[in-house]
Amino acid sequence: PVQAKATAAANDQVAEASLTDGLLVGAAEADTAPAGLRFGLGRAAMPEEISAWDVKIMPDGTGLPAGSGNALDGEPLFEENCAVCHGSFAEGVDNWPKLAGGDGTLAAKDPLKTVGSYWPYLSTVWDYVHRSMPFGNAQSLTPDEVYAITAYILYSNDLIDDDFELSPETWNEVEMPNADGFIVDDRADTEYTEWRTDEPCMENCKPEPVKITMRATVLDVTPDQAGDEAPADAAEEMNHSNDAATVQPTDEAAADEAPAAATEAVDEAAADAGADMGAPDPELVAAGEKIFKKCKACHQVGEGAKNKSGPQLNGVVGRDIAAVDGFKYSNAMQDLPGDWTHEALAAFLAKPKDYVKGTKMSFAGLKKDDDIEAVIAYLQSYP
Amino acid sequence: AGPDPLITEVQPWASGFGDGVDVTPYGLPIRFEGDVIRRNVEWLTADTISSINFTPIHALDGTITPTGCAFERHHSGAIELAKDDYRLMINGLVDQPLVFTYEDLERFPREQHVYFCECAANTGMEWAGAQLNGAQFTHGMIHNMEYTGVPLRTLLAEAGLDAAGELKDKWVYVEGADASSNGRSIPMEKAMDDVLVAFKANGEALRKEHGYPVRLVVPGWEGNMWVKWLRRIEVTNAAVESREETSKYTDTLADGTSRKWTWVMDAKSVVTSPSPQSPIKHGPGPLVITGMAWSGHGKVTRVDVSKDGGMTWETARIAQDGANKALVRFYLDTTWDGEDWLLQSRAIDDTGYVQPTKAQLREVRGENSIYHNNCIQTWHVKANGEAENVEVS
C-alpha cells in the first residue's frame, strides 16, 4: 500500500500549505500510506548510501570522522598535495588562493582573505579539503591526512602549535580569529529603506557638469585587445574569483587507482623500454595517463594544450629545455643547457628540485621508477 | 553612386542551391555570427577549470538567452553525468530518506517558468573603478531561460517533513555531484516557495555546462546557489556554513565585517547597445538604445535612461511585460546627432526599489564587497560612435 492520493491536485495542496501550519502534507495523515509518501516515487535510501554521500561537517564538528593529525604530519602531505598551487607555506602560487596570512587586513584597501584572516568556521576547512581537494583528485585523502593538512594550514596561520593534535576531541580548542566577523544580510535596513522611493529624480538630479572620473581604457585589461596582461593590482583584486584551490594526488592514491594489470604492464614494459625513444608502448602510455593526473593541475598535453601554471608539454620528450614560447620559466630552468632527453626527464621527475635547483615546479617528484617511465611514455605519445 | 549590384546582378544564392535539410541535424548560428560567443577573461582566474565565462549580451536582443552562449561557471569543471547514472538523494530531517532516478523525477507534476540566473560576482570587477570595456565582461555573468522541472517542495513532501517539526527555522542543504560539490544552505521558507528541480532549459535537456541532467533553480537568488548536477538535498536544523557560503559569496564591508547570506540579487539594468562592443556605426540620425533589466525581488516595472550621466532621465519602453524574476528588454527609440553621451539606465522594480549609483553603494559598503554590485553603469558614447566604460562624478 504505497500510493497515497497521487494527483496533481495533491501537489497543489502541497504548494498551498503554509509554513506556519507545521503540517504540510495531507497524505501524512492517511493511515493507509507510509508517512510522507505521496506519489510513491523513488525508493528508500539505504544507510550505507546516506553515509557515503552525507559527509558534511557542521560548524560544531558534528559529522567529523574519527582520526587525528598535527602540523608536523601535515607538512609533507601539504608539500606533496597542496603546495604546487597554495605554496609550501600556504602563501599561494600565482593566482591560486592564499591560505595563510592577511591578519588584520579585512578593513584595508585590498583585504587578504585566508583561512586565518577570514574563514569563520574550522569545519569548512576540514570539509572542503576532505570533499573537494586535491584539485583534480578529490576525495582521495584519508581522514587522518585531512586532519594533518588542516592542522598544517592552521599552523601556517599561527593558530596552533606544530604538535597540536587536531581531532574531534580537540576540535573546540581551535579559535578562528574572524568567527565574529560576519553579520546576516542587513540590506533591508541599510539599503532598501533608502532606495525604495515613490518617484525617482528625473531632472537636475546632480550638480553640473557631470565629469568622467575614470576610464576603462586606461587599464587596458579587456580581452580581445592588444596586451592581454592584467596590471598586477587588477589581477590581485580578482583573487576573489580565483576560488579554486589546487593540489596534487598522493602517490599512493594514484597508484591505487591504476588497475593491477596496467601496473604489471608497466613493470614489464619498463624493464625493456630502457632509453628507447621509439614509439611508446600503448600499455605503458595508458599507465602514464593515470599517473599524469598528478601533473594535470599545472600542465596540459595533447591537442590545443596551453600553458597553465606549468608549460604545455607537447613534444617535450627530446625538445630544448625551457623552449615553450610565452612561458615564464625560472632562471634556473632557462640556464639549464641541453634537451629533455629521456634520461634528463627521468632524473628531473624523480627529484625536480634537486635536478634543477630553483625550479618553479613545486611538485615533490615521482618515487617509483615505473611511474616515471610510464609518464615519459605518455608524454612521448604527444610528439 | 550607381545602382547596387547586389540588386541589379543575379547573386549566387538567388540562382543555385542552399543546404538540404539533412545538412544540419542540430544547428549553430550562421558563420557570420561567429563572434557572438561566450568569452572568458584569462587573468581573472588561475585556471579555466575553476572559472567563469560571459554571455555576449552586447549582441543579443529579446530576453531568452540562447543556451549555447549562456555563461558558464564551474568550480571543478563541467562534468559529464549520464541520466542512467543520475541519482538524487533526499535525507536529513525527513520521514523517509529517498533516492530518485532521473526517470522518477519526470513522473512528478512539472512546472515551467522563465527566470534569470546571475552570478553574485557579476560586475564585481567594477567596484574599485571602471575596468572592463564591454557589457559582455561587466554584465555578462547572467542568463535568462525557460525552465521545466519539479518544485522542490513536491520532492520534500514526498520524503515527508513531519520529522522536521517547525519548518520556519529549518534549512535545506543542496550539493552537486562534481568534485567541487558546491554545497549551499537554503532556508526552508525559500525551498518551499519557488525553488525548482529542473531538467529542461529553453525546451531541451540542460546542457552539460548548465548541470545536465538536473540542476537547482533558485529564482532571484545568486547563481552560486543554483547547484548543478544536483545529487543531494538534506533537511537540516542549521546552515552548514560550507566554503561557498563563508569564504566566498560573502560581502566584506568597509569596516572589515562581512555580510553573509546575501542571497537576493537586487534590481539592475545595463544598456547593451550602444556599448563598447556594440558601437554606433550608422552615423547621426535615428538610433535604438536597448538593454536589459531584472530584479530578484520580483518584476521590473520601469526602466529610465539618461544620456547626460544621470542629470536628466527619460522613461524607456519595456518590450514585453516583465515576468517574475526574469529579464525584461527595454528600448529607447531616439535620435543621436553625433554628440557625446554619458549613457546610463536604471531599473525600478515592483517593490519600488530604484537601482542605485556606484557612489550610493560605496557609501554603504565600501569598495571591497566583490559581490552584488548592481550599480548604474555608464557608457561614454563619443562623436565617432564608439563607447567606453567610464565612471562619472
Image (cartoon, coloured by chain):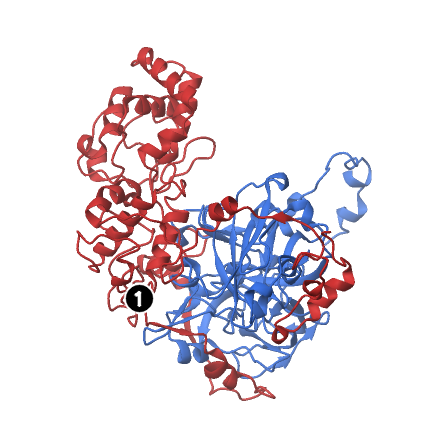
Chain colours: A red, B blue
Q: Amino acid at mark 1?
A: Asp
Instruction: State left or right for residue B221 relative to residue B246.
Output: right
- Locate the C terminus of chain A and report the quarter of the image it occupies: top left
Q: Quadrant of residue B189?
A: bottom right
**B375 or B120, nearer to the observer:** B120
**B201 or B133, nearer to the observer:** B201
Instruction: State left or right for residue B78 relative to residue A265.
Output: right
Reading the image, the residue beneath label 1 is A110
Task: Inspect this view and state whether residue B141 appears.
Answer: no
* Chain at tag 1: A
Q: Position of residue B343 (x, y in %)?
A: 55, 73
Q: Residue furthest front?
A: A31
Q: Secondary structure at mark 1?
A: loop
Q: In the figure, A141 relative to B233: above or below?
A: above
Q: In the figure, B356 relative to A154: above or below?
A: below
Instruction: State left or right for residue B95 relative to residue A295.
Output: right
Instruction: State left or right for residue B76 relative to residue B343.
Output: left
Q: In the figure, B152 relative to A104: above or below?
A: above
